[in-house]
Image (tube, rainbow, N blue to C red):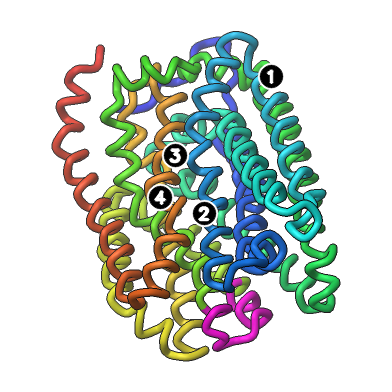
């Protein structure tokens, strides 16, 4: 069904203009999350869990890392209610303030050596607040972009917001590489690690203000209203089209399972095995992020030729094949480990580039604003939140074959969800009013 055209008298906002806001917002979010993820390996085990061995310290850090993803759906539900009561401006302003407070809190946080276990509790609290704030920062721009993109180029415009992931990771890794390579270990752990959090706080504040200016213009307000992109209660969402939340989340599971397993996990595994210098790994990950950017762009071209669902299914199969070789690559010394990172980023870019909106297009207009946000939250929670924790814990104790099992399960879930979606979509379309 073609997207409805703007009503007469309303401003026609170009998809490219919307894409700018989407890329700004997503890149700032990913930078923040990757700063925390990299610090979970390089910093937090030493400063917040000095009483634990290196492996256990990283596992504790990854457990706190997951808290933000658990909190995101609650943040989405809370801030949807705020938007219904006080408007989009109040919602984004409160989310901005909360995000800045949480990120600054981490930057200024005393370590375990100063205040003991209270430092761990504060780290967990600020991480939860970050998740709540990110849930509240949903602005509806990705849904607006999907609805206004030309039908023959929907794959191209779908990948634009996803570019934020490799861009954010590239900048975060480059910043950590610079600090880690130019400072002594004492300087890096003493004060250098705090600098990326200051940068993250500044970037997110600027980005959220830029998005606030964008979505509060008359043109965007009119367009959001035309597309019926308004917040609804989570309970109403679940009653009306809750099944789409779960199908959408599982349809993207292969991408999200791979996400942290090629960004955060390799650094932790190599650091524990001591098979490469940390700076060398960070450099390869920067190259990998570059590969990811190119692959994400390529996913837009591929999806417009063969379809977004076909692209996701094809990449799920390739991720499944990749999972079979993952143990050999990670146990293959520096060359194998670098190949794991680079190949993984290529698959991630091609897959993740089309993971957003492939199934959320099934939502009727009334449910799409809230549905798209909750689908994304659920996909992060099910696919990515615990990936570093589970993969590292199982691999360290029982072998890297469990990394293969984890990735394979994500690929299987994606294929199953896409098959179910194919079966029920015609029924869903028949039930919609003309």
* Residue under pointer 2: 63
Q: Quadrant of the N terminus?
A: top left
Where residue 345 appears, as percent x and y from the top left, is 48, 68
Which secondary structure lies at badge 4? Answer: loop
Does 332 lie within the magenta span? Answer: no
Q: Does 17 appear above or below 49?
A: above
SS state under label 1: helix
Q: Distance between the residues labelled 1 and 3?
A: 22 Å
In depth, the one of 40 and 86 nearer the eye is 40
Foreground mark, 2 or 1, reads 2
Q: Give the range drawn in magenta.
A: 270-285
Distance between mark 3 and mark 4 Cα atoms: 13 Å
Residue 243 percent across, percent down from the top left:
26, 29
Task: Give the foreground label among 2 and 3.
Answer: 2
Density class for disc 1 (Cα within 10 Å; few <14, some 14-19, many ≥20) is: some
User: Of marks 1 and 4, which one's residue comes earlier in the chain?
Assistant: 1
Q: Could you tell me residue 239's position as x and y percent?
A: 29, 17
Please give the residue where the numbered disc 3 appears in the rendered image.
Answer: 376
Label of residue 89 in the image: 1
């Amino acid at each position: 069904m073609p997207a409805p055209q703007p009503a007469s008298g309303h401003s026609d906002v170009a998809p490219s203009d919307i894409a700018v806001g989407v890329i700004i917002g997503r890149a700032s979010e990913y930078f923040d999350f990757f700063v925390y993820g990299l610090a979970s390996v390089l910093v937090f085990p030493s400063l917040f869990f000095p009483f634990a061995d290196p492996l256990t310290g990283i596992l504790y850090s990854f457990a706190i890392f997951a808290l933000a993803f658990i909190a995101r759906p609650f943040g989405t539900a809370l801030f949807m209610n705020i938007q219904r009561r006080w408007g989009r401006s109040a919602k984004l302003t409160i989310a901005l303030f909360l995000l800045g407070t949480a990120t600054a809190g981490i930057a200024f946080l005393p370590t375990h050596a100063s205040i003991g276990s209270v430092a761990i509790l504060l780290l967990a609290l600020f991480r939860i607040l970050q998740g709540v704030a990110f849930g509240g920062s949903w602005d509806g721009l990705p849904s607006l972009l999907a609805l206004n993109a030309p039908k023959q180029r929907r794959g191209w415009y779908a990948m634009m917001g996803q570019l934020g992931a490799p861009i954010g990771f590239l900048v975060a890794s480059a910043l950590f590489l610079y600090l880690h390579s130019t400072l002594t270990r004492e300087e890096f752990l003493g004060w250098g690690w705090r600098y990326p959090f200051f940068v993250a706080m500044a970037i997110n504040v600027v980005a959220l203000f830029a998005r606030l200016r964008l979505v509060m213009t008359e043109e965007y307000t009119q367009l959001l209203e035309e597309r019926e992109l308004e917040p609804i209660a989570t309970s109403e969402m679940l009653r009306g089209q809750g099944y789409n939340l779960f199908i959408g989340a599982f349809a993207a599971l292969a991408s999200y399972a791979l996400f942290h397993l090629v960004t955060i996990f390799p650094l932790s595994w190599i650091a524990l095995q001591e098979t490469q210098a940390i700076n060398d790994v960070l450099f390869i990950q920067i190259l990998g992020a570059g590969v990811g950017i190119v692959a994400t762009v390529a996913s837009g071209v591929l999806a417009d030729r063969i379809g977004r669902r076909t692209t996701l299914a094809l990449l799920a199969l390739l991720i499944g094949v990749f999972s079979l070789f993952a143990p050999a690559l990670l146990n293959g010394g520096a060359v194998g480990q670098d190949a794991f990172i680079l190949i993984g980023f290529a698959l991630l870019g091609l897959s993740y580039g089309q993971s957003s909106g492939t199934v959320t297009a099934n939502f009727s207009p009334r449910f799409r604003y809230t549905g798209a946000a909750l689908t994304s939250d659920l996909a992060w929670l099910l696919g990515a939140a615990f990936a570093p924790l589970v993969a590292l814990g199982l691999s360290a104790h029982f072998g890297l074959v469990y990394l293969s099992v984890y990735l394979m399960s994500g690929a299987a879930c994606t294929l199953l969800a896409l098959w179910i979606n194919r079966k029920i979509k015609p029924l869903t379309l028949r039930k919609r009013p003309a």
